[in-house]
Image (cartoon, rainbow, N blue to C red):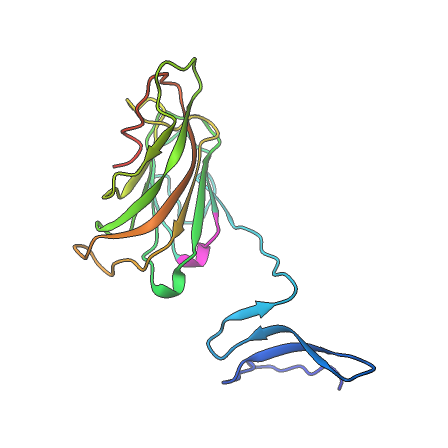
Amino acid sequence: MANTTFQGPVRSEGGFEQITKDGTTGAITTNLDVDSSGNISTTGYVAQQSQILRQTTATGWNDAALTLTVASKSAILIFDKDQATSVTLPAITSANLGVSFTFIETVASDNLRSIVTAYDNDYFVGGVQLGTTAAESGAKGFIPTGGTDTTIKFDDNLANGAGSLGSTVTCTAILTGNTGAGGGAKLVWLVSGSMGTADDNSTGAAIFA
C-alpha cells in the first residue's frame, strides 16, 4: 500500500501498531504498540531532548518567579543570573508520575533561588550530597529532607545552606499530589543531587525548609 496522508487526526479506540513481516514465513513482529490507554511499548528507542530553561532568557521567567507545568517535564532549569528567584513545581496527578526537573547553578550568586512545591502539603523526600569548596572542617556529607519540607534553597552565603557554582538538584514526581492547599500530607517529590558550599562546617540544615 502506498503512503496515505490525512488532513485531520487519525483516531483509534483499539490502539496502533507498527509491524514488520517476515518475507519467508509471513510472521508478524510488532515493533511498537500504542494500546487503548495510550501506553507505549517498543523494541526500539524513543529519542527525547530535554527542554532548556534559562533564568536569563526563558519565556515567563521574569526573574522573580516561574511556575512550571508538566508540559515542561524533563526540563533542565539553569540559574544563570545573579538574582533571587523562585520556581514552583507543578501539581501532580496519577498521569504525571515520573515527571522530573533538573536544576543547576551556572552563575555564582549569594541571592536566594528557591524551588517550591505547588501546595503546602506536597512534600519533598530524599536528600542531596553536600560538599564543601573549602577545606573540610566537620561539614555533613549527606542532607536528607525533613519529612515536611516544601522548599529547596540555592544560596551559598546562607548559614548552613548550599548553592555553590555547579550545584545540581533533580526533583522527580513519585506520588499523586494534592489538588489544593491544606490537603493531606504527601511525599510527592523525590529529591537527589549534589550541592556545594563555601562553609567548611555547614550542617546543611538550611537547604530544605
Of the pair 118 and 21, the residue shown nearer to us? 21
- Residue 161, image x, y percentages: 32, 26
Q: Quadrant of residue 184?
A: bottom left
Q: Which residues are magenta?
A: 70-75
- Residue 152, image x, y percentages: 32, 38
Residue 201 lies in the magenta-colored region: no
Of the pair 209 and 23, the residue shown nearer to us? 23
- Along the horizontal axis of the image, is 119 left or right of 131? left
Residue that appears at 34% across and 54% down: 90
- Along the horizontal axis of the image, is 187 left or right of 79? left
Looking at the image, the residue that sits furthest to the left is: 182
- Residue 5, image x, y percentages: 67, 81
Q: Is residue 28 above or below residue 42?
A: below
Residue that appears at 33% across and 57% down: 175
Q: Is residue 1 above or below residue 156?
A: below
Q: How many marks?
A: 0
Of the pair 141 and 16, the residue shown nearer to us? 141
- Residue 28, image x, y percentages: 70, 81
Quadrant location of the N terminus? bottom right
Q: Quadrant of residue 83?
A: top left
Residue that appears at 29% across and 58% down: 177
- Along the horizontal axis of the image, is 53 left or right of 111? right
Looking at the image, the residue that sits furthest to the right is: 24
Quadrant location of the C terminus? top left
